[in-house]
Image (tube, grey):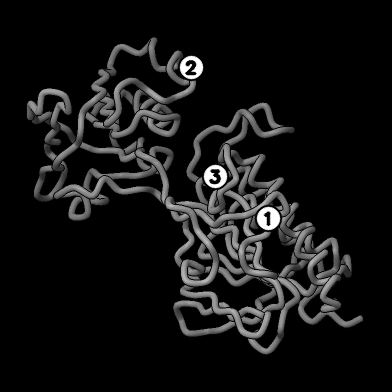
Amino acid sequence: MDFPGFSFDLAALGSENKPDLNVIYDLIVLGGGPAAMSASIYAARKMLRLALLTKDFGGQVASTSEIENYLGFQSISGRELTDKFVEQVKQFDVPIGEGEKVVEVVEKKGAFDIQLESGAVFSCNSLIVATGKRDRPLGVPGEKELVGKGVAYCATCDAPFFKDKRVIVAGGGNSAFTAAIDLLKVGASVTMVNYAVGWQADEVMKSAIAKHEHVEFLDNHQVTQIEGTERVSAVRLKERSSGEAKSLAADGVFVEIGLLPNSDSVRDLAELNKAGELIVDCHCRTSVPGLFGAGDVTTVPKKQIIISAGEGAKAALAAYDYLSEKQLI
């Protein structure tokens, strides 16, 4: 059986393929995180005519400093783990389209057209959406204007630029505490500002930061504005119980208040929940036959790397069963 753009020839392992606009693929996988790459590996092993489309590889994993809960590695950086995932995907010579955003997915008579921002359209008989999530912005005055000028969303990427600086970390969960730890390591003075009462991070994260001297905790506070012209100079806050306003001098603001699902491309096609997550069942099936979801973009609880990887595998196997039942392979 002929599989254009696909080969298990050992001599070809690691070669770079690009998706073909003239091929109707058995399966296309959208995304570049652990769910998408796991799905691609499992689909490749099932000898499906496959393509992977992603804006970039890694997703949230790539911007994580240290990972200590992924099986097989006592400790590994997010970038290193991402590189290992990508290397394994490329061993199967999967056609990869990288660098463009998917604008829209359209269903046509049981098949799917995937339109990229360039206008290119790829077609497939089944689809896995594993596009993950993106940073949730504060949505306050000064935030957009000062992105890259003191406003940041990735401590792994930007913490070293704030050595010995005054930094606000907005958020109260694990990602906020991880950002604070990264900043404290470079000598920054950190003020953590949490909208809710109390702190949502795991105890191990709270214990890790408690030993540091240069950290202050302000819960039940709302960031109302980020001030500065060329760079961040201060952050305005409101104490939510009393309404009291205050201003804190700051050289930077790290926003760690959660994530938004990257489900825009299928919002007019498949059923989403109120949070915008793609609703899936235990077989990764969505409300649309042939359309599957995996990883953080879906309603699957407990957003973890290992869970996303497992969901990607499930989605690929479910897609294979669907194609087999429909006699499309």
Q: In the figure, 140 relative to 203: above or below?
A: below
- Which one is closest to the eye, mark 3 or mark 2? 2
- Please provide percent x and percent y for residue 156: 43, 39
**161 to the left or right of 132:** left
Q: How many marks?
A: 3
Q: Earlier in the sequence, mark 3 or mark 2?
A: 3
Label 1, residues with CA under 10 Å away: few <14, some 14-19, many ≥20: many
Which residue in the rendered view is the most extreme toward the right? 1
Q: Earlier in the sequence, mark 2 or mark 1?
A: 2
Towards the viewer: 256 or 145: 256
- Which one is closest to the eye, mark 3 or mark 1? 1
Label 2, residues with CA under 10 Å away: few <14, some 14-19, many ≥20: few
Q: Residue at x 57, y 55 (%)?
A: 279
| The quarter of the displayed image where residue 19 is located | bottom right
Residue type at mark 3? Val
Q: Is residue 38 visible?
A: no
Q: Which residue is mark 1?
A: 284
- Please provide percent x and percent y for residue 104: 49, 75
Residue type at mark 2? Glu
Towards the viewer: 148 or 47: 47
Q: Residue at x 62, y 58 (%)?
A: 293
Q: Which residue is mark 2?
A: 203
Q: Is residue 40 visible?
A: yes
